[in-house]
Image (cartoon, rainbow, N blue to C red):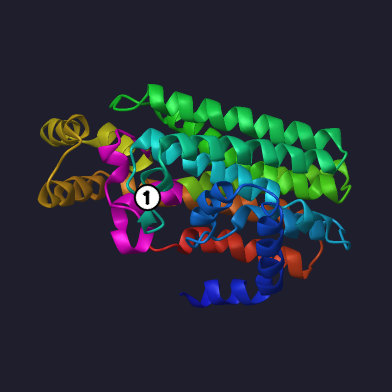
């Protein structure tokens, strides 16, 4: 664990403890199979980034009653629902270093528990009795589905454009983190400028986070990321490092890159050569620059707010997104 990660965790330890209790409390009245399947992911080491962002953004805007924390489970449930569905669609075998839920409880259970969590997130949002919050959650749910559908349609398409990639990651990750931050502002009854600033902070954080996730598939190891390296490539998902390398590659190297994309099954030696070409043709460096650009934009949106503990924490979380192990 890095010194930055330790510092952040020490600053938010009480919040994370409360968030855990809220997440589990909202599952208490329901069937054991629901709790078991959801808890399989909850207990696998997720960072609770989204509910934490709701809590911090609400507090930054003056929430002193813990309302942000109370409604933070909305976004962990939305996130967990997408993980349950994505693992099934992608044919994944591991999530955060553990067997995926559908290999334990079956496909039907994984889908239905995912549906339950989506419905539960809307139910909790309705308890806020604020139509804007309900609209945000409904919008997120639709955009995430659209992002996943579009990615499915583009699976294996070696000509995926930069604009198409950005559209996919906005739907997969960007809107959920953006919505978490915006909801924090809405819960605290922030003014329009504050709401806009935190919405932009969340959008840029979401884009940076997904780009960093995509980069880790080529720069980290299985133990660090909790899934098999090269998983995106095997699933036919073209991400930013590959798109940029393809754009810059010479013909002979482009032929090899495309062969691996089309093949989807490859040896460790072939994968290592593929990664070396991503480095050679600036795919990895370009992705790092894009991540830093979004982090920079996210941090600048916080200039609107005076110095405070929540602001300091949000700044450090932005830095942490880039620090994740490459």
Give coordinates of residue 239: x percent, y percent. Answer: 36, 38
Kindly identify the residue that appears in the image at 89 percent across and 47 percent down. Answer: 189
Give coordinates of residue 322: x percent, y percent. Answer: 48, 59
Instruction: Confirm whether the magenta stretch covers residue 212.
Output: yes
Q: Is residue 153 left or right of residue 198?
A: left
Instruction: Confirm whether the magenta stretch covers residue 217.
Output: yes
Kindly identify the residue that appears in the image at 75 percent across and 39 percent down. Answer: 123
Kindly identify the residue that appears in the image at 69 percent across and 41 percent down. Answer: 121
Give the vertical position of 89 relative to 224 (above or below).
above
Give coordinates of residue 83: x percent, y percent. Answer: 49, 43
Give coordinates of residue 304: x percent, y percent. Answer: 79, 54
Q: Is residue 183 left or right of residue 273?
A: right
Kindly identify the residue that appears in the image at 53 percent across and 63 percent down. Answer: 320
Looking at the image, can residue 203 be seen?
A: no
Question: In front: 249, or 25?
Answer: 25
Q: Give the range drawn in magenta.
A: 211-239
Outermost top residue: 153
In which quadrant is the C terminus drawn? bottom left
Q: How many marks overall?
A: 1
> What residue sits right under mark 1 in the picture?
215
Looking at the image, can residue 154 be seen?
A: yes
Question: In front: 127, or 221?
Answer: 127
Q: How many C-alpha atoms fall within 10 Å of the one at disc 1: few (<14), some, or many (≥20)? A: many
Q: Secondary structure beneath disc 1?
A: helix
Give the vertical position of 91 relative to 96 (above or below).
above
């Amino acid at each position: 664990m890095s010194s930055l990660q330790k510092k952040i965790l020490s600053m938010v330890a009480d919040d994370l403890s409360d968030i855990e209790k809220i997440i589990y409390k909202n599952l208490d009245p329901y069937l054991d199979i629901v709790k078991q399947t959801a808890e399989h992911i909850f207990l696998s080491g997720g960072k609770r980034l989204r509910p934490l962002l709701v809590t911090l953004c609400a507090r930054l805007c003056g929430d002193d009653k813990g309302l942000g924390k109370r409604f933070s489970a909305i976004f962990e449930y939305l996130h967990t629902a997408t993980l349950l569905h994505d693992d099934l669609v992608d044919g994944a075998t591991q999530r955060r270093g553990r067997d995926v839920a559908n290999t334990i409880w079956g496909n039907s259970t994984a889908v239905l528990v995912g549906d339950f969590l989506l419905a539960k997130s809307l139910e909790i949002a309705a308890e806020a009795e604020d139509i804007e919050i309900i609209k945000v959650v409904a919008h997120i749910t639709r955009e995430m589905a659209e992002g996943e559908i579009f990615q499915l349609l583009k699976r294996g398409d070696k000509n995926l454009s930069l604009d198409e990639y950005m559209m996919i990651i906005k739907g997969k990750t960007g809107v959920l983190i953006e919505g978490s931050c915006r909801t924090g502002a809405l819960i605290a009854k922030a003014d329009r400028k504050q709401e806009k600033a935190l919405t932009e902070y969340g959008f840029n954080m979401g884009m940076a986070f997904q780009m960093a996730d995509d980069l880790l598939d080529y720069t980290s190891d299985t133990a660090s990321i909790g899934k098999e390296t090269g998983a995106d490539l095997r699933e036919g998902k073209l991400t930013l490092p590959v798109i940029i390398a393809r754009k810059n590659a010479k013909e002979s190297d482009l032929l090899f890159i495309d062969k691996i994309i089309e093949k989807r099954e490859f040896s460790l030696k072939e994968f290592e050569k593929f990664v070396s070409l991503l480095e050679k043709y600036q795919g990895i460096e370009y992705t790092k620059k894009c991540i830093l650009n979004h982090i920079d934009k996210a941090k600048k949106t916080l200039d609107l707010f005076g110095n405070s503990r929540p602001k300091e924490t949000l700044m450090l979380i932005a830095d942490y997104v880039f620090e994740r192990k490459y």
